[in-house]
C-alpha cells in the first residue's frame, strides 16, 4: 500500500509528511499523506493555505502500528523525545510502507530501526542508528529512571551511537 499503481503499470511512492515538510512547503510529491495530529500542529496562515492547495490525504494511524512504534521507541530510548504526532506519523509510515519526510532526528532514528525509508528536508539526515540511555548526574549510574535510585540525583539522556 506504500506504492500506488499508475496507468502505465509503474508504481509511485507514497510520502508521509511531518509538520516541518508542510510548514517549510518543501514537500510536493504526487502521493502524500499525513495524520490528523500533524495537521493540528499547523498554525500559521501560509501553511494552512498550502494545505488547501496541495493534495495531502489525512488518515488515522492504526493502533497495532502505534503500539509497534512505541515499543521500538522505548528500545532506542527515543520514547521520551517523540510527541504523539511523531508516533502516529511513524505508525502511518510503517502501516503503508511509505517514505517518511522529516528532519527530526528522533523520528529518523526510530524509522531506521523499523526499516522505514525517510527523506530529510533541510537538515542532513542521520547516518547511523543511535540509542539514548539515562545517566545519573551524581554517581554516573546508567538507569531507566529520571531520578537515580542509588543517590537520588537527576538523570539525563545521553546518546550512544550503535555500531
Image (cartoon, rainbow, N blue to C red):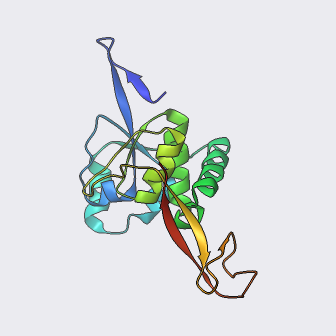
Locate residue 121 relative to residue 110 in the image: left or right: left
Locate residue 132 relative to residue 119 in the image: left or right: right
Q: Is residue 134 above or below residue 115?
A: below
Front-lying residue, 65 or 61 = 65
Q: Position of residue 139 (x, y in %)?
A: 64, 83
Front-lying residue, 120 or 29 = 120
**Residue at the outermost top position:** 9
Q: Position of residue 157 (x, y in %)?
A: 54, 72
Number of on-image labels? 0
Locate residue 94 relative to residue 24 in the image: left or right: right
Name which residue lies at 28% across and 45% down: 54
**Looking at the rendering, which quadrant does residue 42 occupy?**
bottom left
Q: Is residue 29 above or below residue 52?
A: above
Locate residue 13 relative to residue 38 in the image: left or right: left
Front-lying residue, 59 or 133 = 133
Q: Position of residue 93 (x, y in %)?
A: 49, 41
Residue 18 visible (yes or no) = yes
Name which residue lies at 50% across and 34% down: 96
Residue 59 visible (yes or no) = no
**Looking at the rendering, which quadrant does residue 11 occupy?**
top left
Name which residue lies at 25% across and 59% down: 24
Q: Position of residue 161 (x, y in %)?
A: 46, 56
Name which residue lies at 46% across and 50% down: 129
Front-lying residue, 149 or 34 = 149
Amino acid at each position: 500500500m506504500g506504492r500506488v499503481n499508475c496507468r502505465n503499470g509503474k508504481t509511485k511512492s507514497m510520502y508521509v509528511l511531518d509538520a516541518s515538510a508542510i510548514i517549510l512547503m518543501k514537500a510536493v510529491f504526487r502521493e502524500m499523506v499525513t495524520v490528523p495530529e500533524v495537521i493540528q500542529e499547523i498554525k500559521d496562515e501560509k501553511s494552512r493555505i498550502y494545505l488547501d492547495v496541495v493534495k495531502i490525504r489525512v488518515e488515522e494511524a492504526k493502533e497495532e502500528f502505534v503500539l509497534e512504534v512505541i515499543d521500538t521507541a522505548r528500545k532506542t530510548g527515543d520514547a521520551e523525545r517523540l510527541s504523539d504526532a511523531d508516533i502516529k506519523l511513524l505508525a502511518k509510515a510503517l502501516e503503508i510502507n511509505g517514505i517518511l519526510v522529516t528532519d527530526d532526528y528522533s523520528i529518523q532514528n526510530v524509522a531506521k530501526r523499523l526499516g522505514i525509508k525517510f527523506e530529510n528536508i533541510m537538515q542532513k539526515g542521520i547516518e547511523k542508528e543511535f540509542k539514548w540511555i539515562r545517566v545519573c548526574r551524581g554517581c554516573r549510574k546508567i538507569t531507566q529512571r529520571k531520578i537515580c535510585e542509588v543517590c537520588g540525583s537527576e538523570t539525563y539522556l545521553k546518546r550512544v551511537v550503535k555500531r
